[in-house]
Image (cartoon, grey):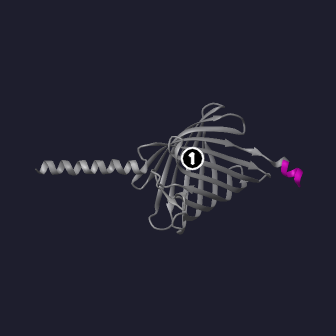
Amino acid sequence: MKKVITALVLLTSILSTNAQSELTGEDDFGSWFMYFGTNKIADRWSIHTEAQFRYYEMASNFNQTLLRTGLNYHINPDAIATLGYGFIDTDPTFTEFDEISSNNLVRNNSISEHRIFEQFILKNKVWEFKFEHRYRLEQRFVQNNYTGETNTLNRARYRIQMTLPLTDIFFLNFYDEIFINLQDSAFGQNRAYAALGVNVTEDLSMQFGYLKNHFTGANFDRLQIGVFYNTDLRGIFKKKN
């Protein structure tokens, strides 16, 4: 009898774990589609542009849209300071729950976030390895669009990135980034990333990579496709001036 009870407890535990994974989407391979741009407007100034579209599954089951911009000051070729703003629209649930309100379909789990950030980047090179250290502080103004509840959150992030050129066209890119909450529980998340990069032109590159996104009690696997396009707009701004 004890063996039967033990077996039932184990079975219940396994089913509960599987159900939780299905609800969070941990068992599904998601995807992030990303664009990043550094648009130079003066010798020491540039504008950061960024758009990301994230899905719980491969190009389906919406998770998050992230739009971010910022003003960069290039202290020297290896040091950049940035002040920026981001808007983030998030559906935090793997399974969407909807309700009918006034004959309109309303997604009741949508979260909107306005974010201000301060950032400092340092670059260095060791043999053929190019390193980048990114330090970021974020002030997050988060609103639950169903309840109307708002929260102000603060967070620190540190990312170490390494790039290894293979040829003039191909390169490898790796990074690890940790998120530290400045309130409540300190650990927020950790992202580990590896990618193959392609230099399409001098100003345009692409990366095809894999991201392991770790939260307390949850892990997500994500395919990442990134486009990096850097432009020099100094001529346009000089003509206007």
Asked whether residue 30 is drawn in magenta, I would say no
Residue lying at 65% horizontally and 54% vertically, measured from the top left: 68
Residue lying at 19% horizontally and 47% vertically, measured from the top left: 7
Q: Which residues are magenta?
A: 236-241
Residue lying at 23% horizontally and 49% vertically, measured from the top left: 10
Residue 52 or residue 40, whichever sits in front: 52
Image position, residue 64 (x, y; %): 55, 52
Outermost residue on the left side: it is 1
Residue lying at 35% horizontally and 49% vertically, measured from the top left: 19
| Residue type for callout 1 | Gln
Q: Is 109 drawn above or below residue 25 in the view shown?
A: below
Q: Which residue is mark 1?
A: 161
Which secondary structure, mark 1?
strand
**Residue 125 as seen in the image, left or right of residue 29:** right
**Residue 217 as seen in the image, left or right of residue 237:** left
**Residue 189 as seen in the image, left or right of residue 3:** right
Determine which quarter of the picture holds residue 230. top right
Image position, residue 136 (x, y; %): 59, 58
Q: How many marks?
A: 1
Image position, residue 22 (x, y; %): 39, 47
Image position, residue 71 (x, y; %): 71, 57
> In the rendered view of the protein, which quadrant contains the C terminus?
bottom right
Q: Is 142 drawn above or below residue 228 in the view shown?
A: below
Asked whether residue 239 is drawn in magenta, I would say yes
Q: Main secondary structure of the magenta part?
A: helix
Binning the other alpha carbons within 10 Å of mark 1 as few (below 14), some (14 to 19) or many (20 upward) gives: many
